[in-house]
Amino acid sequence: MVRIVETSVRDGHQSLFATRMSTEEVVKLCKLYDDAGYYAIEVWGGATFDACMRFLDEDPWERLREVRKVCKKTKLQMLFRGQNILGYRHYSDDVVDMFCKKSIENGIDIIRVFDALNDIRNLEQAVKSTKKYGGECQIALSYTTSPVHTIKYYVSLAKKIEKLGADSICVKDMAGVLTPEDATKLISALKKEVKIPIELHSHCTAGICEMTYMAAIKAGVDIVDTSVSPLSNGTAQPSTQALCVALKGTEYDPKLNMKPIHEAEPIVTDIVAKYLKNGLLNPKSFEVNPNILNYYVPGGMLSNMIKQLTDQGAMDRYEEVLKEIPNVRKDLGYPPLVTPMSQMVGTQAVLNVLNGERYKMCAKEIKDYLHGKYGKAPGKINEEVKKKIIGDDETITCRPADLLEPEFDRLKEKYKDIAKCDEDVLSLALFENVATEFLKKKYNKQETEVDEFEMFI
Ligand code: CO
């Protein structure tokens, strides 16, 4: 029997309509999903944290607590970017520890941790802390293809992860480039070499995902990630209902209780219709796009790049930029294109094409990467390019977070006028500007409500 993790309320809307589902919508669906018999529901982390405050004026911690209240039987899962937590820089170990603690306290059961470079050292603290507070820790391997990303590479990484103390491993194919043939080889090899459960997470962007899932299931994968349709396919995960039909009566039958899922369908249909109507969901997101198999570009990265080019009035250079991506990636030692590397490589490709000279201009993040501040590159960095960008600067080879002083107490002091709890401090630590504005509004509003109430007494 294969188990299922439901993704519609996290990756589903993050991939299809920029993470705009409201807490009310998420809670309504989770209440039904709780009776379906999923292995877990992915409800938090990724871009949901930032989007809650930035676009919806909602507290992400409150969303988690609300979901926990209605999910009494099913495990709740979140996505966590290793030493980056949910932000874009490296945080010190004590902040990572506090974030794991508070996530678990507020209702998370499973923390899925990944690092864009698959640098194990960036995962260590998150694993340690998740286990310390009684959580289940899953490590996700960022999947990509390149001369260094072979089956042997992934198997050796998986063995190290098992040793690190992870409870399970996920193959995280954010761009949807894993083919059925490669899935058969990779999953078979992982099942042979490691004992902990293996999960597969992919996207339908290239149009091959269902076939890949089937191949992985036959090769013995334990869990797959799917999303309730019509909030599925396109740049999101395959349909939960369709997979259940395809596996019904077989030895892999996930045996979900379909009644609550069918009850959720009209709600999901209304949500999809709402975001199609307000334009946040572009019907293009549902189109099959096999081109990504050539460029390894995740959906979100593509839309980012299109925006950068449109802003510069340079959409006519789109094809050139697409072709430059694999070159930049090679120069940087083949990083998997997942946040934050996808944004960094995409922006560099745009700069290289628009400036008419490669690496004439570079973002600070690329310089930091070359200095070793993100960890170890998977492959060899092009020395000529490196020299052009950072000259003979010294680079670091230790675990990047070893250079960071503990910072939680300092942050707590810094934000003492705005933050009312440790959760607020963490929100501010991750997204200072957005959280400052959000929390000011939140607490001002509450104070005004109290004042008005007092006036009537
Ligand atoms: Co995903």
Image (cartoon, helix red, strand yellow):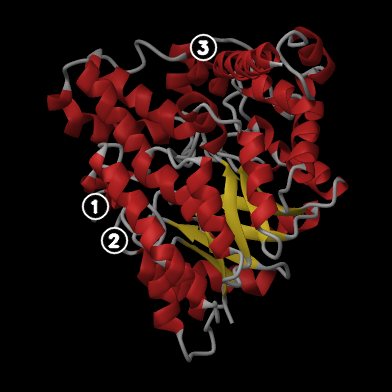
Does the beta carbon at disc 1 come under 8 Å from ligand 1? no
- Helix, strand or loop at mark 3: helix
In the rendered view, tell whether residue 423 sits above or below residue 244: above
Q: Residue at x 73, y 21 (%)?
A: 425
In the rendered view, tell whether residue 20 sits above or below residue 228: above
Which residue type carries mark 2? Answer: Gly
Which label number is shown at residue 167?
Answer: none
- Observer-nearest of 29 and 189: 29
Q: Residue at x 67, y 14 (%)?
A: 447
- Helix, strand or loop at mark 2: loop
Q: Which residue is mark 3?
A: 390
Which label number is shown at residue 289?
Answer: 1
Expressed as whole percent of the image width and height from the top left, the position of residue 264 reads 45, 63
Which label number is shown at residue 207?
Answer: 2
- CB of mark 1 within 8 Å of CB of mark 2? yes
Is 392 situated left or right of 328 in this image?
right
Q: Nearer the viewer, mark 3 or mark 2?
A: 2
Instruction: Give the mark nearest the N terminus, 1 or 3.
Output: 1
Q: CA distance from mark 1 to mark 3?
A: 37 Å
The N terminus appears in which quarter of the rendering? Answer: bottom right
Expressed as whole percent of the image width and height from the top left, the position of residue 350 reads 29, 23
- Note whether residue 10 is visible: no
Is 256 situated left or right of 325 in this image?
right
- Helix, strand or loop at mark 1: loop
Is 77 situated left or right of 317 in this image?
right
Kindly give the residue lying farthest to the left in the view shown: 316
Expressed as whole percent of the image width and height from the top left, the position of residue 48 reads 53, 38
- Observer-nearest of 389 and 350: 350
Expressed as whole percent of the image width and height from the top left, the position of residue 77 reads 64, 53
Does the beta carbon at disc 3 come under 8 Å from ligand 1? no
Instruction: Give the mark nearest the N terminus, 3 or 2.
Output: 2
In the rendered view, tell whether residue 341 sits above or below residue 367: below
